[in-house]
Image: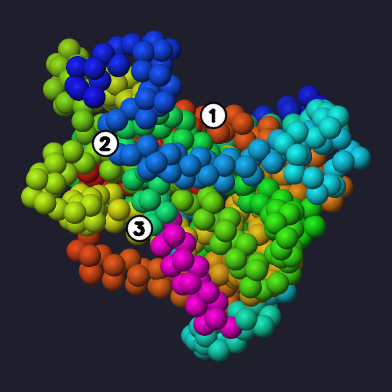
């Protein structure tokens, strides 16, 4: 079986097992400690709930809170592979931080591309994707939301792109966009067109990963919207029909308002996930074309290919600020408050596979 | 068609229905009074959508059974001549595929148990007590979902490098355990909220401690929600590429996404093996996803529509 020998199995179980054991022991130890301090020392009524929360708080501090603060610290340094830490000549200061933030906007983010073209491309990509997902998803959902034969079969097949592991999907598409052997170009040549250089042309590479994300994103939106449509009671349509509403009027005055509680969070999360999508622009870009990078892939490459950690940290803060601005603005404009809603209902997530 | 005959139709088997109404009238059962042409059009559109959705996956299967001498062909035949399952054998026995799957499976399963344990106890605290900081804590959990994954990678990498965790699984195990906790807490808290407190009170009157009632009453009643939380944890760790990519550099430690990427890089020589590996990974995942799709996607529609 390849190189999976009993020795390796033993070693891997040992490493993972010991780590898990350490995590459990540390978590339980800290919980006892906290409980003792809270109930005996401080004597609060809430000692038990706080104790139960201890592992989650510590874990999230390590994985989320600490990295965020560390990110701010890094943005004020000039850390790179050569200057990895203070003992290797890394410097830190307000001037360095301002320099990093100035570089984000005035110097190339990678080798040639500047910040604003990349930002423009990211916005174009996000807008295109979310628009197409919602409009095509709505179309398919309306078609599927009528009594007919084979509905379950159609639904299951249309869901395949969502069900397949995303890495498998993007790696397969990357192969199929091969100019010579991929089925896309074979089909184009079959109908008498010329093959398209998907991986070398700047424009076509951008289109290539857009096509892949249409394929991946529409099914999920279809099923979400289908769920919303199915919960609309038929009597609304009947009374609208009696009042003489046309089909279009029924769509805009019954369907849209009734589906809004599903649509709004789906759009907000769709924008955030698309904006942050890493796998698709990164993998469908085999030649590393800088003109195909969106902000998050540019961030990843600035950090892990060019090893400009300080600069990348500043870029990350700028990206996060943009995203936060969008979310707040959208919530203000639409009057939608996810935190209130989320108090009662969980956000969708089957979905969150793009991290 | 009157209501009575529609009712009858439901009670009859498919074959009996077709025999009674004829294939044509059975297929185009008049439910909304649309014309047959319109219905054919709808089916055509849906079938086209299905072909677009399924064809790339079908292509993986076709390529995986291509014999070596036909690997590079521009034929689009649905089944190659002299189809062979040889690529599957080579992937399993000659490549590190099984090792990668084992690594992924071990890490993922182990971290799922830790993640669900952390989330289930924290969610209990959020569900049953009103303590200072509860609301802001819940909002914080929601906000973590909006942070770009790539933003945290640089600090996590540097932290891991300073702690000597690069090229070990330790860092990965800890990170994966926590990764899905915010979302799991949300799901579980929502579910716990629906369990009446009186059940627990009854248990406590009978001498159960607070944690005992959690263990004996809440957990057994929450198995469906725990299963979903487990599945989410599993998915996130199982499909993760980014974190594994920065933490692991030695190929014998790879998880399957890293290994598959390596196979794809050599697709000029290993195309059928790459396809075979892809398919073997996808089939179990796809069955699991499609079977549970109603529950997984339900999260969005259930709570928000019925308010």
Is residue A63 located in the magenta-colored stretch of the structure?
A: no
The answer to whether the residues at label 3 and label 2 have Cβ atoms under 8 Å apart is no
Q: Residues within 10 Å of mark 1 (few under 14, many from 20)?
A: some
Q: Name the residue under label 1.
A: B287
List x then y, in percent, for residue A134. Answer: 38, 56
**Secondary element type, mark 3:** helix
Q: Name the residue under label 3.
A: A267
What residue is rendered at 57% in x and 46% in y? B52
List x then y, in percent, for residue A131. Answer: 41, 62
Dots 3 and 1 on the same chain: no
Q: Name the residue under label 2.
A: B33
**Secondary element type, mark 2:** loop
Locate the N terminus of chain A and report the quarter of the image it occupies: top right
Above or below for A347 versus A293: above
Residue range corresponding to the magenta coloring: A114-133
Is residue A122 located in the magenta-colored stretch of the structure?
A: yes
Above or below for B288 versus B174: above
């Amino acid at each position: 079986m390849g190189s999976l020998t009993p020795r390796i199995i033993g070693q891997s179980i040992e490493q993972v097992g010991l780590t898990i054991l350490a995590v459990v022991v540390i978590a339980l130890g800290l919980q006892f400690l906290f409980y003792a301090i809270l109930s005996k020392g401080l004597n609060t009524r809430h000692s038990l709930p706080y104790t139960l929360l201890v592992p989650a708080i510590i874990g999230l501090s390590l994985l989320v809170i600490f990295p965020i603060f560390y990110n701010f610290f890094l943005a004020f340094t000039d850390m790179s592979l050569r200057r990895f830490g203070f003992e290797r000549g890394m410097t830190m200061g307000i001037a360095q931080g301002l320099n990093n933030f100035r570089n984000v906007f005035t110097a190339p983010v990678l080798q040639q591309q500047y910040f604003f073209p990349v930002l423009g491309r990211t916005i174009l990509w996000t807008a295109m994707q979310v628009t197409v997902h919602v409009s095509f998803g709505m179309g398919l959902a309306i078609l599927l939301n009528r009594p007919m034969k084979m509905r379950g079969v159609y639904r299951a097949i249309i869901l395949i792109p969502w069900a397949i592991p995303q890495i498998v999907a993007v790696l397969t598409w990357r192969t199929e966009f091969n100019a010579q052997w991929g089925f896309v170009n074979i089909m184009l040549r079959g109908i008498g067109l010329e093959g398209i250089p998907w991986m070398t042309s700047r424009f076509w590479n951008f289109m290539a990963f857009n096509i892949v994300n249409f394929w991946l994103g529409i099914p999920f939106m279809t099923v979400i919207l289908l769920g919303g449509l199915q919960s609309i009671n038929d009597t609304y349509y009947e009374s609208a029909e009696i009042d003489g509403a046309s089909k279009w009027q029924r769509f805009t005055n019954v369907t849209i308002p009734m589906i809004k509680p599903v649509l709004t969070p789906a759009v907000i999360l769709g924008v955030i996930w698309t904006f942050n999508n890493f796998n698709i622009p990164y993998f469908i870009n085999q030649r590393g074309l800088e003109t195909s990078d969106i902000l998050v892939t540019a961030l990843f490459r600035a950090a892990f290919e060019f090893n400009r950690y300080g600069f990348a940290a500043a870029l990350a803060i700028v990206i996060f600020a943009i995203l936060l601005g969008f979310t707040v603005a959208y919530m203000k404009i639409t009057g939608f408050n996810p935190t209130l809603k989320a108090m009662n209902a969980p956000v969708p997530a089957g979905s969150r596979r793009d991290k | 068609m009157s209501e009575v005959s529609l009712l009858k139709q439901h009670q009859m088997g498919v074959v009996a229905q077709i025999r009674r109404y004829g294939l044509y009238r059975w297929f185009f059962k008049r439910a909304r009074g649309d014309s047959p042409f319109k219905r054919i059009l709808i089916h055509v559109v849906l079938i086209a959508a299905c072909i677009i959705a399924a064809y790339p996956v079908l292509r993986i299967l076709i390529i995986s059974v291509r014999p070596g001498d036909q690997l590079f062909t521009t034929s689009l035949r649905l089944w190659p001549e002299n189809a062979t399952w040889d690529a599957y054998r080579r992937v399993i026995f000659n490549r590190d595929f099984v090792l990668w799957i084992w690594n992924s499976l071990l890490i993922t399963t182990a971290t799922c148990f830790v993640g669900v344990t952390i989330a289930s106890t924290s969610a209990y605290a959020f569900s049953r007590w009103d303590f200072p900081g509860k609301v802001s804590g819940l909002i914080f959990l929601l906000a973590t979902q909006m942070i770009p994954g790539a933003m945290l990678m640089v600090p996590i990498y540097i932290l891991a490098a300073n702690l000597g965790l690069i090229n070990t699984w330790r860092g990965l195990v800890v990170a994966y355990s926590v990764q899905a906790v915010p979302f799991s807490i949300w799901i579980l808290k929502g579910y716990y909220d629906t369990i009446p407190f009186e059940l627990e009170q009854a248990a406590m009157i009978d001498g159960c401690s607070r944690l005992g009632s959690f263990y004996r009453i809440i957990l057994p009643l929450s198995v469906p929600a725990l299963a979903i939380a487990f599945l989410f944890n599993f998915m996130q760790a199982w499909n993760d590429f980014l974190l594994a990519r920065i933490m692991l550099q030695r190929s014998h430690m790879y998880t399957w996404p890293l290994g598959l990427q390596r196979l794809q890089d050599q697709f000029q020589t290993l195309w059928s093996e790459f396809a075979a590996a892809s398919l073997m990974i996808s089939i179990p995942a796809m069955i699991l996803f499609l079977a549970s799709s109603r529950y997984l996607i339900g999260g969005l529609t259930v709570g928000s529509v019925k308010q």
